[in-house]
Structures are given as structure tokens and as C-alpha cells.
Amino acid sequence: MLSFKELAAVFNDYLGGYSYPSEPSGLYKPVEYIMSLGGKRIRPLLCLASYNLYHNNVMKAADAAMAVEVFHNFSLVHDDLMDNADIRRGKASVHKKYDDNTAILSGDVMLIMSYQCFEKYPEKFYELNRLFSKTAIEVCEGQRMDMDFENMERPPIDDYIKMISLKTSVLIACALQMGAVIASAPSKDAEHLYEFGKNIGIAFQVQDDLLDSFGKDAMIGKKVGGDILQRKKTYLYLKSLDLLSQEQAIRLKNLYSEQTLSDAEHIHEVKTLFKAAHVDVHAQELKLVYQQLAMSHLDAVDVEESKKQVLRSFAENLLDRSY
Amino acid sequence: MLSFKELAAVFNDYLGGYSYPSEPSGLYKPVEYIMSLGGKRIRPLLCLASYNLYHNNVMKAADAAMAVEVFHNFSLVHDDLMDNADIRRGKASVHKKYDDNTAILSGDVMLIMSYQCFEKYPEKFYELNRLFSKTAIEVCEGQRMDMDFENMERPPIDDYIKMISLKTSVLIACALQMGAVIASAPSKDAEHLYEFGKNIGIAFQVQDDLLDSFGKDAMIGKKVGGDILQRKKTYLYLKSLDLLSQEQAIRLKNLYSEQTLSDAEHIHEVKTLFKAAHVDVHAQELKLVYQQLAMSHLDAVDVEESKKQVLRSFAENLLDRSY
């Protein structure tokens, strides 16, 4: 069993040895650029860790891990363009460093490249591709729901959970299941690992919402209140509307439709209402529900407890950020 | 053996019975929209025709035909956005009818949907996917080369042929090969059908370049001289630079870098130089070379001559537009 750090070393080695096509350079340089910006590589490492529950030669799972990482980066390239987000991991996003058309086309080729990674698994090809396509479609659906929420006054909380599940969790789930598929694990195990990942993903996103409003700048690596300034209809916002008095709820809605206050005042007022609603307690509870659900699926995976320690620690680390 | 018209009826039936997912509608309505705009459906029909060389139940090849058609339409959605082309088949293009972000995201989901079509062929899945990914990558490379040529004074003619081959011909070739693969045709046949399609595609594009400058408005369904106005570095332009005197070549280059003349004057002057170079004769010769190469590959396909008549007539019809 390799530790998460050791798995990261394996995947970094793989990435270092990966050679992108050279021509036309206008197509492939942007691919190399976004892939080189780093990030936590959570999805590929989970794919390797899942495979490692069953076998030691984790390099066997590296191509599938790469597929997921390339797909994730494809989605960042297109999402950054759609969101007009000029910074990615502290550097210029692809459409900013190059141009919009380059972001579209190099993103497209990344999506195709991610499919090509599975060609290394002729025997598992059908199963991997099918799972991957289903997941990729869901990610697009989640992104569309997120875009649609901008124009909705009050999307149902259930739809919000569905959106974050599609937009972020299913790819984490897919990465874990793929590791199991490549390892020829029992299908029950593969499904439990999928559900483990999916629920961890949702818990992580709820925590992310919480940290955005209640974290400290230094802890989250960005300014507190970004979601609030962007008027994002997060769980905190939607649940507060349920919990607050009618008068307070109207005030919160107005804050999200107006632009009259300074940024600092706007954040302060919204947070005051979030606190009045005690929505942080509810969000923590929700996070815990998904976290426990995730762990119950990990418990159900039919391998020795000691082997699951890597995934267990990973989840605990990911979800222990208090605010 | 079905005629091309009968194959079209089969594919239209298939399309009519195809149900797109309904939600989120902001994702899938644009997909239905672009797919409903019609077009000649050349690629899917060639896929069916190729399958039909070997077997009668052409519906068996309909899902692969659909994959190619969905992919082709995906490329139109993203290309129209990149080219700022507001009209597609006489209607608003997707980014114009909806918005830019919708064109990006619904295009992405179409690319994934095209992969999903192959799930109907578990036994040929690996072969079909591999061919499809290779082709899809090449289409992106062709599009990138086309974009790069805009900023090059004089791309080599060989690169121009390579660009049109990647951007348009390989998908036609892929469609034909897929029909053969699904029919379990001998691999030699599948390769000859691929080469038939690829060379037909190049011949067709050269003809398209010719018609743009030397056709009649009514014949080509659009204004003559569109490429000339857009300063596209087509075969006619690049070959003329080879054929003209130094003085004339400088004049042609200047015409492509200036915007001083009226549209009509610009087209007239460029065409006068094209005629002085007799570049139409060269282009016709080039078209014929590729057309004959295509036919020699069709000849080499190991099925009865009578069965090949549909593909032969198709190619002749496609390439008999004189100017």
C-alpha cells in the first residue's frame, strides 16, 4: 500500500514522462500549459488509491487517472472561458494567456485526448468508456444547471445538491470506480467506491460553501465572501431563506438583487443574516450526513481495513477544515 | 442494395425516432436545434452505404452514422462560434440563437454524445472508438491549422492540402470505414473505403474552392467570391502566387493585405489575376488527381461491381459540378 504522498510521486513521474504531440503547437501548447499548472491532482490520485486497494503495480491505473485529470482540466478551460475567470491556480487562464478560440479548440482536443487514454485498457475499454461518458455528460448537465441558477430567484435546495453532485462529485466518484474496474474488483466494491467518492464530493462542496463565508482568508487561500459577492445561490443562501423570518428573507433576497452597497458592507450584511439563521449549523450537519454516508460505503468495500486507511485519511484530511 | 435516396429515408427515420434527453433543456434544446437544421447528411449516409456493401440490414449501422453526424454538428457549433458565423443552413447559428456559453457547453455535450453512440456496438467498440478518436483529433488539428494560416503570409501548398484533408476529409473517410468495420468487412476493404472517402473529400474541397471563385451564385447557393473577400488562403490563391509573374504576385499579395477597394472591385481584381495564372486549370487537374485516386481505392474494394454503384454514383454526383 502506498501513502497518498507516494501515489502523488508516482503520478507526477507519469506526468513528467508524458509527451504531448508537438504540432500544431497552437493546439497542444495550451494543453501542456493548463496541465502544468498543477493543482491537487485529487481525482487521479483517488483512481490510483482505489486500484491500490487490490494490486500494487499502481502504474497500471495511471492512464485512466490521466484521463480523469485531462477531462477535469478540459472542464476548467471551458468553464473559465464561460465564467470570464482570468486567473487559474495563480496564473492566467487559457483564454487569457492565449485567446478565446484557442480555449475552445484546445479544450475540445483535451476532451478527445481523455478518451484516448482508455485505449491502454482493451479488456476494460467498454466498461471504462461507458462510465466515463456517463460522467462527462453529467458534468455538462451540472454546469448547465449552475448557469441556469443564475437566472432563477430561488432554485430548490434539492436541485442545488443535485447540481453540485453533477458538477463536482461524479467525476471524483468515477475516478474511484475506474481504479476498481481496472483492478478487476468485484462490482459491488466498485459501486461502493463510486458512492464513497460521490458523497465525499458533496460534503467537500458544502464545506467549500461554508469556508467561503465563514473561513479565514489565509485558510482558504482566497478572499472570504467570493460566493457572496458573486451572488451565488449556494446552500447557505438557499437554506437561510428557509430559516429566516419573512422580513429577513426579503432583505437577503434584496441584497442578492441589488448592487448598492460596497463589497465589504454587502459581505457583512449577508453574513449577519447567515449567522442570524444559524445556517452554518445546518450546513455542518449536512456535510456530516454526506461524510458519514461516504464512510459507510468505504466500510462496505470488501478489503482489509488496513488497506482502506489511505482513503479514510484522505477523506478526513479533505473534510477536517473547520472555520 | 439501397439507393442513396433510400438510405436517406432510413437515416431520416432513425433521426425522427431519436429522442434527446429533456433536462436540463438549456443543454439539450440547442443540440436538437442544430441537428434539426438538416444538411445533406453526407457522412452518415456514406456510413450506411459502406455497411450496405456487405449486408442489407443498414439500420445496424445507424448508431455509428449518428455518431459521425453528431460529431460533425458539434464541430459546426464550435466553428461557427470561433468564426463569428451567424448563419448556418439559412438559420441562426447556435451561439446567435442562444448565446456563446450555450454554444460552448452544448457543443461539448454533443462530442460526448457522439462517443456514446458506439455503446451499441460492444463487439466493435474498441475499433470504432479508436478510429473515431484519431479522426476527431485530426479534425481539431485541421481547424487549428486553418486558424494559423490566417496569420501566415504564404502557407506551403502541401500544408494547405493537409489542412483540408484533416478538417474535412478524414471524417468522411472515417464514416466509410466505420460502415465496413460494423459489417465485419476485411480490413483491406475497410482501408480502401477510408482512402476512397479521404480522396473524395479532398477533391470536393478543391472543387469548392474553384466554385467559390468561378461558379455562378445560383449554382453554389451563395455569393461568388466569399473566400476572396475573407482573404482565405485557398489553393487558388497559393498556387496563383507560384504561377504569376513577380509583379503580379506582389499585386495579389497586396490585394489580400489591403482593404482599399470595394468588395466588387476586390473580387474582380483577384479573379483577373487567378485567370491570368490559369489557376483554374491547375485546380481542375488537382481535383481530378484526387478523384481518380479515390476511384482506384473504390475499385480495389473486394465486392461485386454492381454493389459499388451507389458509392460510385455518389462520388460522381458530388464531383460533377462544373463552373
Image (cartoon, coloured by chain):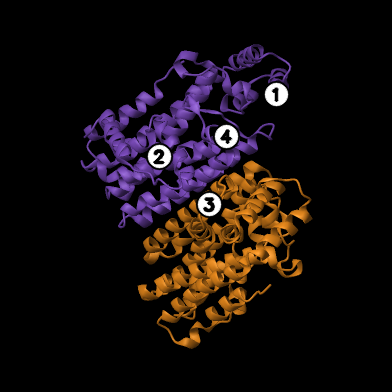
Chain colours: A orange, B purple
Task: Give the quadrant of residue A121.
Answer: bottom left
Which image quarter holds the N terminus of chain B? top left
Is B54 rendered above or below residue B318? below
Where is residue A184? Give x, y as percent: 38, 74
Circle number at residue B253:
1
Name the residue at 61% across, 68% down: A207
- Residue beneath disc 3: A155
Q: Amino acid at mark 4?
A: Tyr
Q: Amino acid at mark 1?
A: Lys
Name the residue at 53% across, 19% down: B280
N-terminal of the pair, mark 2 or mark 1, is 2
Circle number at residue B69:
2
Where is residue A130? Give x, y as percent: 39, 59
Residues under labels 3 and 1: Cα distance? Answer: 57 Å
- Residue beneath disc 4: B160
Chain of the residue on which disc 2 is drawn? B
Chain of the residue on which disc 4 is drawn? B
Tell me if residue A232 can be seen: no
